[in-house]
Amino acid sequence: MANRDIVSTLYERMRLPVIVAPMFLISGPDITIAAAKAGIIGCFPAPNARTIDILEEWLDQIATELNGTEYEGMWAMNMIVHRSYDRFEAELALVERYKPKFVVTALGSPKRVLERVHAFGGKVFADVINAEQAEKAVAAGVDGLILVCSGAGGHTGKYSAFAFVEEVRRFYDGPIIVGGAIQSARSIAALLALGADFAYMGTRFISCPESLVTDDYRNMLVDSKMSDIVTSDVVSGVMANWLKASLEKSGFDLKSDKGSTEIDFSDIHGESKAWKDTWGAGHGVSATECIESVAEVVESLASQLGTLKPALEHKLSAWPKW
Ligand SMILES: Cc1cc2nc3c(=O)[nH]c(=O)nc-3n(C[C@H](O)[C@H](O)[C@H](O)COP(=O)(O)O)c2cc1C
C-alpha cells in the first residue's frame, strides 16, 4: 500500500480522523478496544503491561474482541525502541504473533522494528519531535510520521504544529499525524487545513472510564485549565507537561532544573513511584469538563464537526477575493 493509500483506506473506515495517543500507565486494552469500536484508532504503550505475560493477555483480549468484526485492525501498539529498554525483543516477538496493522515507535529510531513489522504487512508510524528526526525516519522507510508538537501531554515537543507540519510537508507527502493540545473538532479541522491527516489525542481521553487512571486523576483533569499545566524536566530528565498540583503533591521542586539528563528505561517496571504519582496532561486539558466514555467523546467531537462544517464553508465563501 502506497503511503497516501493508507490515509484513504483509513478514512473510509473511520468515523473521525483521530488516534487515541498511547499514554504511560493510562492506556491499556479497554481504551484501545473502545476506541476501535467508536470508529477511531486505539493505541496503548506495550510497557503498560507490567509483565510480558500480561502483554500477551492484553493482545489476546484485543484480538478476541476485534478480529472478525468490522473494527478488526483499528488499533496500534506503541513500542519504546530506546536501547535502554530491555523488553524490546520479547515485545517484538509478540508483535510478530499478533500482527497489529500499526506499530508506533517512540523515543528512538524506528529502524529496529521496520523490517520485522513490514515482513507481516504491518505499518510503522514513528513519533518525532523535530524535522531532523522526521527526515531520518522517512529515510529509514517509515509509513507515517507522528509530529509531537508543543502543548502535548507527557513528553512534549517544543515546536508549534503550524510550523512543524509546514516544514515536514516540504519533504514528505505520506501520512502525518499530529499530537499536542488537540481537543475539539475545531482543532481537528485546523489540522486537516494545515495539511495533516490525523489527530493524535491523548489528554482528551485520559479521564475516560476505560483508562487505567484513578478517580483522583480524573477529577483533577476536570478541575484543571491550561494555566494548571507546567512544563518541566524534574520527573524524568526530559521536558514533559504535567498537572502542576500533582507535581507539588508528590514533592517535586519545580525550581530545580536537572538539565537534560540521558533518558533511561531500564527500570521502567521497577518500584520507582515518580511516574505513578505524578500526572501528565497537555495544554488542551480544559476540554475535559466531565467524565465521559470514549464513545461519548467521539460522539461529541463528531457532532461538533457537524456544526463546524457549514460554519467553515460560510466563512470561506465570505471571502470573495479567494
Ligand atoms: C500522561 C501521559 C503519558 C504519556 N505516555 C506516553 C507513552 O508512554 N508513550 C508515548 O509514545 N507517548 C506518550 N504520551 C504522549 C502521547 O502519546 C501524545 O503525544 C500526547 O498525549 C498528545 O498530546 P495531548 O495530550 O495534548 O493530546 C503521553 C502523554 C500523556 C499525557
Image (cartoon, grey):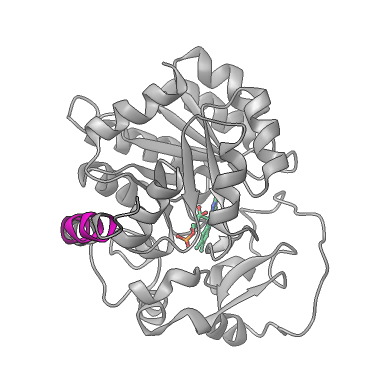
Q: Is residue 273 visible?
A: no
Compare residues 109 and 189 and report the one nearer the observer. Answer: 189
Main secondary structure type of the part rendered in magenta: helix
Q: Is 292 displayed left or right of 246 in the figure?
A: left
Image: 70 above or below 206: above
Magenta stretch? 305-316
- Residue 244 in the image: above or below residue 5: below
User: In the figure, 230 relative to 61: above or below?
Assistant: below
Q: Percent x, y for residue 94? A: 49, 27
* Quadrant of res 106: top right
Q: Nearer the viewer, residue 19 or 247?
A: 19
Q: Position of residue 127 (x, y in %)?
A: 58, 43
Give the x, y percent position of residue 109: 69, 34
Question: Residue at horizontal 46%, vertical 14%?
Answer: 120
Identify the residue at image location x=57%, y=82%. 244
**Rendering coords of residue 247 (x, y %):** 60, 80
| Residue 312 within the segment the image draws in magenta | yes
Give left or right: position of 243 versus 36: right
- Residue placed furthest toward the front: 321
Q: How many marks?
A: 0
Q: Quadrant of residue 126?
A: top right
Residue at 52%, 21% (x, y): give it.
Answer: 117
Side (left or right) of 252 relative to 97? right
Q: Is residue 164 visible?
A: yes
Q: Which quarter of the rendering shows the N terminus?
A: top left
- Left or right, 182 with respect to 130, comes to left
